[in-house]
């Protein structure tokens, strides 16, 4: 099964959805009109062996990620979280104390982001731990930030640093410990000058997530290796391993940073000052369609490499051919 082919199959029926559906499948959240209000909804699952490893990751961090991963999608839309519900399938050998820590941490994390956990469902089974969280959000007076809308010549910007999210350094493991960019995203989305033309959160990695922005606008993109904001762990991994820094930055995934595009004149100031203490880096430019939506990287030797299909490899998965 190819995830991308299944998604295309799903998107093919978007036009059949009623007009109350304001954002159909294919964005970071879907949206529906309820009594004159636009309500945004997202769901994400967290699977042992895929998104975390119960054998080594602390239960508190797994629980926190179950909530923050969804909140990163709320950030991608520039929205405000409203409430969460969760469903979990808990393995038979899970201890009562572990299950209570799992629930307490999920509830406290949700509360911290003004997104109360208001319900859910628990099952037990023989399979590995699986947590599924649904979050609702509102826009409170502004239009949602969508994946579509990039223009030729737009600067491509990212918040924070990229790559090495699975690697632990000094007790910090980015994919478990990240801060969802809710506040930065909201400031961008509501800003009279710096509102981006499109936005996405980086969950699968810059290469494949930027490809989503390109496809949504029927454009291509080139990023420049020398502009990429590498994380500390990216530099460490590149020193120790076989892959260059840029490859970690574009394909490790789970950065949970924002990627957005805007007119160059609007991006000035933002790049210099960052936003709400978070650095913003311009990493490249949106370009015309090349018969398909292509994401390229310009390497230091001035050659270009097509990275459109360089996506995130889940834990335990081998490199796609
Ligand atoms: Mg997302």
Image: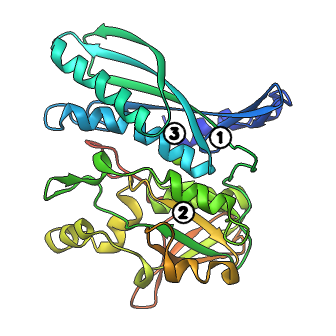
Q: Is mark 2 within 8 Å of ligand 1?
A: no
Q: Residue placed at 67% from the left, 60% from the top?
A: 198
Q: Residue at x 42, y 76 (%)?
A: 228
Residue 218's quadrant in the figure? bottom right
Task: Quickly name the residue at label 3.
Answer: 3
Which mark sits nearer the N-terminus, 2 or 1?
1
Q: CA distance from mark 3 to mark 1?
A: 9 Å
Foreground pick, 294 / 162? 162
Position in image of residue 196 (x %, y %): 67, 65
* Residue 241 percent across, percent down from the top left: 17, 68
User: Which mark is drawn over residue 252?
Assistant: none
- Distance (Cα) linking label 3 and label 2: 22 Å
| Distance between mark 2 and mark 1 Cα atoms | 22 Å
Q: Secondary structure at mark 1?
A: helix
| Residue indicated by mark 1 | 8
Asked if residue 94 shows in the view, the reply is no
Give the left or right position of residue 189, taking residue 72 as reference.
Answer: right
Q: Is residue 31 above or below residue 210?
A: above
Which of the two labelled residues, at mark 3 and mark 2, occupies the earlier sequence position? Answer: 3
Question: For this rendering, which residue is in front, 319 or 212?
Answer: 212
Marks 2 and 1: CB-CB under 8 Å?
A: no
Could you classify mark 2 by the number of other residues whose Cα lies within 10 Å: few (under 14), some (14-19), or many (20 or more)? many
Residue 299 falls in image quadrant: bottom left
Q: Residue at x 51, y 83 (%)?
A: 272
Q: Nearer the viewer, mark 3 or mark 2?
A: 2
Quadrant showing the C terminus: bottom left
Q: Give the structural element (helix, strand or loop) at label 3.
A: helix
Q: Position of residue 6 (x, y in %)?
A: 58, 35
Q: Report the residue marked by disc 2.
A: 259
Camera-nearest label, 2 or 1: 2
How is the protein colored in the picture?
rainbow
């Amino acid at each position: 099964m190819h995830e991308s082919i299944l998604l295309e199959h799903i998107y093919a029926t978007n036009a059949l959805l009623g007009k109350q559906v304001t954002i159909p499948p294919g964005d970071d959240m879907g949206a529906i009109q309820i009594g004159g209000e636009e309500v945004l909804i997202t769901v994400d699952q967290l699977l042992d062996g895929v998104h975390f490893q119960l054998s080594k990751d602390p239960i508190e961090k797994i629980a926190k990620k179950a909530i923050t991963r969804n909140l990163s999608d709320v950030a991608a839309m520039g929205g405000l979280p409203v409430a969460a519900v969760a469903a979990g399938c808990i393995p038979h050998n899970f201890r009562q104390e572990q299950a209570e820590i799992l629930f307490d941490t999920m509830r406290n994390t949700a509360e911290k982001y003004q997104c109360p956990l208001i319900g859910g469902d628990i099952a037990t089974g023989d399979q590995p731990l699986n947590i599924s969280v649904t979050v609702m959000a509102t826009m409170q007076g502004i239009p949602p930030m969508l994946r579509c809308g990039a223009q030729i010549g737009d600067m491509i910007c990212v918040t924070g640093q990229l790559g090495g999210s699975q690697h632990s350094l000094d007790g910090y493991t980015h994919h478990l410990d990240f801060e969802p960019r809710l506040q930065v995203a909201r400031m961008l989305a509501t800003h009279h000058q710096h509102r981006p033309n499109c936005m996405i959160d980086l969950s699968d990695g810059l290469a494949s997530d930027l490809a989503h922005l390109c496809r949504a606008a029927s454009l291509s993109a080139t990023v420049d290796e020398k502009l990429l904001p590498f994380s500390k762990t990216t530099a460490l991994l590149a020193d120790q391993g076989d892959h260059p820094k840029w490859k970690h930055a574009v394909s490790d995934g789970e950065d949970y940073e924002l990627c957005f595009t805007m007119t160059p004149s609007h991006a000035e100031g933002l790049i210099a000052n960052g936003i709400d203490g978070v650095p913003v880096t311009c990493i490249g430019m949106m370009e015309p369609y090349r018969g398909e939506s292509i994401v390229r990287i310009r390497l230091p030797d001035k050659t270009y490499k097509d990275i459109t299909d360089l996506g995130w490899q889940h834990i335990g998965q081998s490199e796609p051919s």
